[in-house]
Amino acid sequence: MFPNIPFDRVNWFTSGFLVITFFTAVIGTPIYFVSFGFDPVILGIFATMFAASGMSITLGYHRLFAHKAFKAKKPVKIFTLLFGAAAFEDSALDWASDHRNHHKHVDGDEDPYDISKGFFWAHMGWIFFKLYPRELNNVNDLKKDSLVMWQHKHHRLIGMLVGIALPTLIGALHNGWVGALGGFLVGGIARLVAVQHSTFLINSLCHTMGKRPYDSGTSARDHWFMAIFTFGEGYHNYHHSFQHDYRNGVKPWQLDPTKWTIWTLEKLGLVSHLRRVSDEKIVLAELREIKSQTEAQIVDNQGWKLITCSTRQEAYEKLVEISHQLTEGYHELEKAAADRIKMSRENLTYWRDQTTRAAEQITMMRHLQATSVA
Ligand SMILES: [Zn+2]
Ligand SMILES: [Zn+2]
C-alpha cells in the first residue's frame, strides 16, 4: 500500500506516542471544556507549563546546551533539564547532537531534518524513523556534564513526572478528579503537543517562509510570525548565520523572549559569558547578502532590452552606483570586523541605510522587468 515507506526502519514507540498524544489533545481538550466548563486555572496550568517547557527547549536545549551561547549556573541547568524532559523531545544530549548535525550539514543529506526532503519530513517525519543508536560523537563537551548525563539516563521518567504527573497533581489539588483530568489532558498532553509542534515549526516553516537578510545560501529564514510561537526562534536566518549568538531576534524591535530571559538571568547572576556577534559583523553579513543580490540583478539586466526608456536607464544606473558604494562599504566593514574595530553608530546606521536603499532599488528593477515582460 505504501511501497516507499521503509517499515522496518519505523520507530513504532515514538510514532505511536506522537500520533496518540496528538489526537488525544485535539479531540480530548474540546470535549473536556464542553463537558466540565471553562476553568481559567486549567488554562493557567497549560500556559505555565507551556512557557516552562517551551523555554527549557529554546533557552536550555537549544541556546545553552546545543550552541553554548552562554554559561549557566546549576539552578538554570537543572530547571531546563527537568522541564525540557517534560517536552518529550528526547534528552538534551540527543537533541543537541541532532541539532549540531542540522547546523553542520544544513539542507544536505546528513541534516536530520533536511527541508529538501519535504515540509512534513522536516517538521516531524524524520522522528518516525529509528534514530538509535545515535553516534553522539559531536557532543563530547556535554558528556562531561554530570547533570546532562543524569538527564540523558532518566529523561523519560523525568518527563512523566514533571510533564504529566505534576500538572495532574496541581489540577487535583485545585478541583478533585475533574481538575486532575484537566491537568493531565490540557496541562500535560495538549501542552506537550503544543510545545513539540512549536519546535517542529522551526525546522519546517522557518526553513520555508520568510526573508533571508543575512545569507541566502541556506534555506533558513527570518519571520516575525514564527517568533510568536517559538519564544523568539523565528529569526532563523540570523541564527544559522551566527549560531553561537545568544540572541536570535537581534534587532531591538524583534520579539525574542528567550533572549530577554537570558539577559534577565544574567542580571540576577544566574548565567554569564553571553556571546554576542559584533554589530560590524552583522551589518557586514547584511551588506554582503544585498551586494551579491545587487550584482546578480545587474548581470540580469545587462543586455536586457528594458534599457530603452529613460526611467529604466535611470534605475539601472542607480543600481550600478549603489553596487559600487556597497563594495566600498563591504571592504570598510570587513576590515573593521577583522581588526575588531568599533565603528561609530552613525557609520553603521549609514551602511544599514545603504542596504535598505539597495533592497528598494532591486525591488524596483524587478518590478520594471516584470512590467516590461508583461
Ligand atoms: Zn534550522
Ligand atoms: Zn540552532
Image: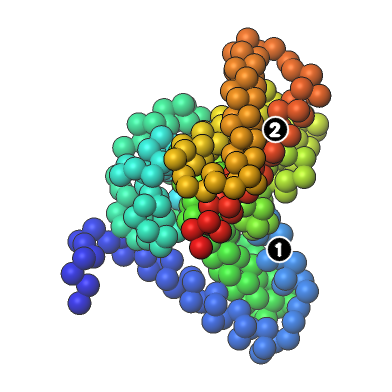
The extreme top residue here reads 339
Q: Nearer the viewer, residue 349 or 245?
A: 349
The image shows residue 125 at horizontal and vertical percentages of 37, 60
Q: Is residue 160 left or right of residue 174?
A: left
The image shows residue 369 at horizontal and vertical percentages of 53, 52
**Image height of 251 relative to 164, above or below:** above
Query: Does label 2 or label 1 sit earlier along the sequence?
Result: 1
Q: Is label 2 in a helix, a strand or a loop?
A: helix
**Image height of 266 relative to 185, above or below:** above
Q: Nearer the viewer, residue 122 or 61?
A: 122
Q: Residue at x 73, y 39 (%)?
A: 251
The image shows residue 260 at horizontal and vertical percentages of 75, 41
Q: Is residue 154 left or right of residue 244?
A: left
Q: Residue at x 51, y 33 (%)?
A: 295
Residue kind at label 2, given as amino acid type: Gln
Few, some or many C-alpha atoms within 10 Å of disc 1 (few <14, some 14-19, many ≥20)? Answer: some
Residue 203 numbered tag: none
- Per the image, the residue denoted by label 1 is 47
Q: Residue at x 36, y 52 (%)?
A: 116
- Per the image, the residue denoted by label 2 is 354
Location of residue 68 by image quarter:
top right
Residue kind at label 1, given as amino acid type: Ala
Q: Nearer the viewer, residue 260 or 240?
A: 240
Q: Which scheme is used to colour this image of the protein?
A: rainbow
**Image height of 44 relative to 9, above or below:** below
Q: Is residue 169 visible?
A: no
Q: CA distance from mark 2 to mark 1?
A: 43 Å
Q: Quadrant of the N terminus?
A: bottom left
Note whether ligand 1 is within 8 Å of mark 2.
no
The image shows residue 253 at horizontal and vertical percentages of 77, 45
Q: Is label 1 in a helix, a strand or a loop?
A: helix
Q: Is residue 263 visible?
A: yes
